[in-house]
Amino acid sequence: MDRDGAYQEKVNGVTVDHKGMDLNYFGARYYNPVIGYWISLDKAEQFWSGYSYTANGFNPVNAVDPDGNTVGSYLVSKTIVSYYRTNQVYKDVKMMKDPYPVGGKDNENDAFKHVYASAEITRRVGRLDALVWGTARELYGAVKTKLFPNDSPTPGSGKMDLTNNSLGREIGSNSKSSHESLKLSKETVDGGKANVMNPTNKKD
């Protein structure tokens, strides 16, 4: 809706201006999708031609310009977004109440949180993202163990976590909601499918 309550059509998340020439309004300037050019200079003066979209090695395929101000690498932008969305899932899962009695490291709670976090990252962000960031976290843990041996986890816990991450990706690929991911992750641990190195007595 605009200020007058009129419906505004959007393409690629930006407003299509029907008052004039069907231009796409990005917030900082207008883009003409027919000829593939901005119709005004960009504030950052990032192109050899201030009106061109495809310049300096960038084009609509390999770059993004979300607000019409600054163009950037699509891969870099996607990686940053993926990281923050994935990190948010880890934070959400970390704040959850443990579903099993508190015990030592690498128990059912740890297994469940790895399965569920991986499932939710797969569902919300993407399966490849879950694989990349999940593996990166375990590699970081392995490096940290080498640097700080006194704070080292149980031997083999990295393999346990990677196994549970893989189970989570399978769940997330077939889940349609967080509730379904949660239910299936719990069933995976309860059914003995998850890798648990230091099991504790489960709640009835």
Image (cartoon, rainbow, N blue to C red):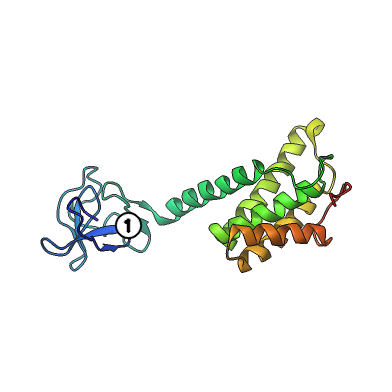
Name the spot of residue 93 as percent of width and height, x first.
64, 46
Please rate how many residues cluster around mark 1, counting C-alpha atoms within 10 Å: few if below 14, some from 14 to 19, many from 20: few
Task: Write the residue at 85% across / 45% down.
Answer: 155
Task: Write the residue at 80% across / 49% down.
Answer: 108
Task: Write the residue at 67% across / 66% down.
Answer: 170
Name the spot of residue 9 as percent of width and height, x first.
25, 63
Task: Write the residue at 16% across / 64% down.
Answer: 22
Quadrant position of the N terminus in the picture: bottom left
Q: Amino acid at mark 1?
A: Gly
**Of 6 and 152, the residue lying toward us:** 6
Residue that protrudes farthest toward the left in the picture:
20
Residue labelled with disc 1: 57
Residue that protrudes farthest toward the front in the picture:
204
Identify the element where label 1 is drawn.
loop
Q: How many marks?
A: 1
Establish if 39 lies above or below 88. below
Name the spot of residue 33 as percent of width and height, x first.
21, 65
Q: Quadrant of residue 45?
A: top left
63 relative position to 152: left or right: left
Name the spot of residue 53 as percent of width and height, x first.
24, 58
